[in-house]
DNA sequence: CATCACGCTGTTTTT
DNA sequence: CAGCGTGATG
């Protein structure tokens, strides 16, 4: 039985207006902490309560998890049917539609999705195809190329424009990059591949060009809501336009001050353009903040007050009292880590739970130093953002065995799995793939390759595995079990840290249980990758500290928030290449981070005096210092943390026998060519000296792998 | 094919 | 500094 909701007492007037608003286009400008999610949840509940069929309601969010959580909340609030509301990301909706209608954009419905690393791999493999006049020319690496092509796609602009705008150092090779871009597009087409960008672009095309599909969808969705609208790009805005064009029942919610996805073409101006997209748009502003104390809000308001362009007004809060935010110059990065550990221990001693605390930063690697210190001090933490579970080698290897069956044309996965066979490398795997294609050989008959000899005997086992996987009665669960049996020996051979990797692979078993078809299992893995740490049920969640990139912390809140604003190395403008900060976006990033805090906010930075990272790569400052300098000083307390003289490590140092000896100009306990062991990477050979406390070690087992490792983590073998 | 030495060069964030 | 490409060697 559905509960009756007393909307008037649960919502403030502006929220109530948004929830109860009649049909028609609505733009909700919702400041940080203003109950945006709450409003959406109540609106879903309200729509269902008043008789809208759940399937006719569409809730587009930034992550699928966010959608799921909102729908669960709505279901608990009123009516269990809220769980049947369609919710997800633009990408997941696009995929759902394209799996049925891909032929309308010239694809088979069984196309494969390229994740980011696949995309880079394809691009990389195409570089030799563009004949460069001179090898001497500086050419971007695969990651940069992927960024450029992706941005061009998202902005729907020529690559050349993106290069001119943002990658000045590569203007000379712009024609080659453009050429590469077209090769990449052609490759995707012939091999039935779509990257993340293609999903939404194809969806947009489908809606734009196919009247029937457009009509079908826009009729199906009687009410559409879009969260985080400030982070949508032009393509997504057009998708919204088409989806809602029939009924016009569209509500978008966002905050231009929190737009931090410009790297993928997002533009907060979408918010402002919305009324011109839909005539008679009703605008509702949520300006009351329920999250933060007044001193925190004063700081965040002042911070955004510096912005050149800004559409939302200042927020107000009724939460009086509370501590002023603290800004600490810790001088060094290690000092920053020590400060946080000390502070957290104090808080815990006072009875605060670790769950209440989060540490936020801009880039995943900014927390490395802190993570080391937390581990030393036995403070448990979970980290979000950065490292992708799905993109680690063993997971990709594993899933590749299933991917080749869904899309036989999938050369990337074929190369992956063939190279895992003994004595088959890049060259041979390409020959085999060509042969299979030419002769139209089914996957399970790989071993029939004419070149198969004693050395390639492993192909037989691979063929057997694939024939089992093709069997009609195979479920995703059984497939995972089969591949597991086949792949585990390879894993053990290839990686010395296989226990950890094996455990991660086992996480795939329960996930596979939820699917009937291999294809949808793989789709979901790409669009909703599981986090690297096993998901723990909320009830039994351990008390842990949260570390997160600012991007991954969006929409969340904690009583205590630390922000670590690491100085990044940047090339000074005196060099041929310099990379200045985008201060406007950096400020919004800072704003998003700071507005996560409910009660206490501590911002730390390691100081302008930080030494250069290496000779020409200076730490030329970050946005924080300029923002802080421009703020009224009474908004925060400024402290100068003491410089830690003793680096506070060394307690757990000794591993192996260390007898120092001198080389030409460095002193090292290790000699070149010496065998060493590392707890995570296994055994390797010392290749060269790289720093006073580091050697480069070559690991044969994990493929071609050179790492720079500290002496203290190595043990002589 | 697998291993290894060495020189060059410069951001990051996510679906 | 450290990741990556190149090219030499077994």
Image (cartoon, coloured by chain):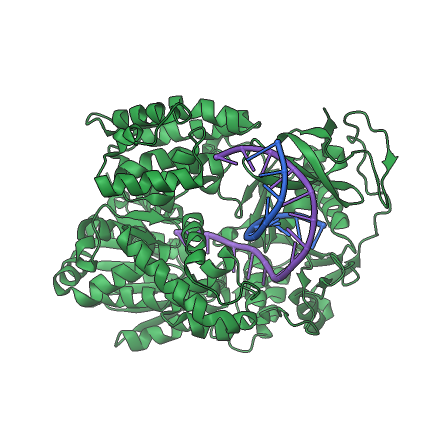
Chain colours: A green, B purple, C blue
Q: Nearer the viewer, residue A333 or A70?
A: A333
Residue A680 in sight here: no
Q: Residue at x 30, y 62 (%)?
A: A201
Residue A209 in sight here: yes
Residue A328 in which image quadrant? bottom right
Residue A350 at x, y percent in the picture: 70, 39
In the picture as drawn, the residue positioned furthest to the left comes out as A212
Q: Is residue A366 above or below residue A501?
A: below
Q: Is residue A499 above or below residue A236?
A: above
Q: Is residue A397 above or below residue A140?
A: above
Q: Nearer the viewer, residue B5 or A659?
A: B5
Residue A642 at x, y percent in the picture: 84, 52
Q: Residue at x 37, y 44 (%)?
A: A412
Q: Is residue A24 above or below residue A439?
A: below
Q: Nearer the viewer, residue A333 or A130?
A: A130
Name the side, left or right, on which B3 lies relative to A330.
left
Residue A518 at x, y percent in the picture: 27, 35
Q: Can you say which quadrant of the picture contains the N terminus of chain A?
A: top left
Q: How many marks?
A: 0
Q: Residue at x 48, y 64 (%)?
A: A263
Name the side, left or right, on which A100 lies relative to A88.
left
Residue A102 at x, y percent in the picture: 20, 53
Residue A299 in which image quadrant? bottom right
Q: Residue at x 42, y 29 (%)?
A: A421
Q: Nearer the viewer, residue A137 or A319?
A: A137
Q: Can you say which quadrant of the picture contains the C terminus of chain A?
A: top right
């Amino acid at each position: 039985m559905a509960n009756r909701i007393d909307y008037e007492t649960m919502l403030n007037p502006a929220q109530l207006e948004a929830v109860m608003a009649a049909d028609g286009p609505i733009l909700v400008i919702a400041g940080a902490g203003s109950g945006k999610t709450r409003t959406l949840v109540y609106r879903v509940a309200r729509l269902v309560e008043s008789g809208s069929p759940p399937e006719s309601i569409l809730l587009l969010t930034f992550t699928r998890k966010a959608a799921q959580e909102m729908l669960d909340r709505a279901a608990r609030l009123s009516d269990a049917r809220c769980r049947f509301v369609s919710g997800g990301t633009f990408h997941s909706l696009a995929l759902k539609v394209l799996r049925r209608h891909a032929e309308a954009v010239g694809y088979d419905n069984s196309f494969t999705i390229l994740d980011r690393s696949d995309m880079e791999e394809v691009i990389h493999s195409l570089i030799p195809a563009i004949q460069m006049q001179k090898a001497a020319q500086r050419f971007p690496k695969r990651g940069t190329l992927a960024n450029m092509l992706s941005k061009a796609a998202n902005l729907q602009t020529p690559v050349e424009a993106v290069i001119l705008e943002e990658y000045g150092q590569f203007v000379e090779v712009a024609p080659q990059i453009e050429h590469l871009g077209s090769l990449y597009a052609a490759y995707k087409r012939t091999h039935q591949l779509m990257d993340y960008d293609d999903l939404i672009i194809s969806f947009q095309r489908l809606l734009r060009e196919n009247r029937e599909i457009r009509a079908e969808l826009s009729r199906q969705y009687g009410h559409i809501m879009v969260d985080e609208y400030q982070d949508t790009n032009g393509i997504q805005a057009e998708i919204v336009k088409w989806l809602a064009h029939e009924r016009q029942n569209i509500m978008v919610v966002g905050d231009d001050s929190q737009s931090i996805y410009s790297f993928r073409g997002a533009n907060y101006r979408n918010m402002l353009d919305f009324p011109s997209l839909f005539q008679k748009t009703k605008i509702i502003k949520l300006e009351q903040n329920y999250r933060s104390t007044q001193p925190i809000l004063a700081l965040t308001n002042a911070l955004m007050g510096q912005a050149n362009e800004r559409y939302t007004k200042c927020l107000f809060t009724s939460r009086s009292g509370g501590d002023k935010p603290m800004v600490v110059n810790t001088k060094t990065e290690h000092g920053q880590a020590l400060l946080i550990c000390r502070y957290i221990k104090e808080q815990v001693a006072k009875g605060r739970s670790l769950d209440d605390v989060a540490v936020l930063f801009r880039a995943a690697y900014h927390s490395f130093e802190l993570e080391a210190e937390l581990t030393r001090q036995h403070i448990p933490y979970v980290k979000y953002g950065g490292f992708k579970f799905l993109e680690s080698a063993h997971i990709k290897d594993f899933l590749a065995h299933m991917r080749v069956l869904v899309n036989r044309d999938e050369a990337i996965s074929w190369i992956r799995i063939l190279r895992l066979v003994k004595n088959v490398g890049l060259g041979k795997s390409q020959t085999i793939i060509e042969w299979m294609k030419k002769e139209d050989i089914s996957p399970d008959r790989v071993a029939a390759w004419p070149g198969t000899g004693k050395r390639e005997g492993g192909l037989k086992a691979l063929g057997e595995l694939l024939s089992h996987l093709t069997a009609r009665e195979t479920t995703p669960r059984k497939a995972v079990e089969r591949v597991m049996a086949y792949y585990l020996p390879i894993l053990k051979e290839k990686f010395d840290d296989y226990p950890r990797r094996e455990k991660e692979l086992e996480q795939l078993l329960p996930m596979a249980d939820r699917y009937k078809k291999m294809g949808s299992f793989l789709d979901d893995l790409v669009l909703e990758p599981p986090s690297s740490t096993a998901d723990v049920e909320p009830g039994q969640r351990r008390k842990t500290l949260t570390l997160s990139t600012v991007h991954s912390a969006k929409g969340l809140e904690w009583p205590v928030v630390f922000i670590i604003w690491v100085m990044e190395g940047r090339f000074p403008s005196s060099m041929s290449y310099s990379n200045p900060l985008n201060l406007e976006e950096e400020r919004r990033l800072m704003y998003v981070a700071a507005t996560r805090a409910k009660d206490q906010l501590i911002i730390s930075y390691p100081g302008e005096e930080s030494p250069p990272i290496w000779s020409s790569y200076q730490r030329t400052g970050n946005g924080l210092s300029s923002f802080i300098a421009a703020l009224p000083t009474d908004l925060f307390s400024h402290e100068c943390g003491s410089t830690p003289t003793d680096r506070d490590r060394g307690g757990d140092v000794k591993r192996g026998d260390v007898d120092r000896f001198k080389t030409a100009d460095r002193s090292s306990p290790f000699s070149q060519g010496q065998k060493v062991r590392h707890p995570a990477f296994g055994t390797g050979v010392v290749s060269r000296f790289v720093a006073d406390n580091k050697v480069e070690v070559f690991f044969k087992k994990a493929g071609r792998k050179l790492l720079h490792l500290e002496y203290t983590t190595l043990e002589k073998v």
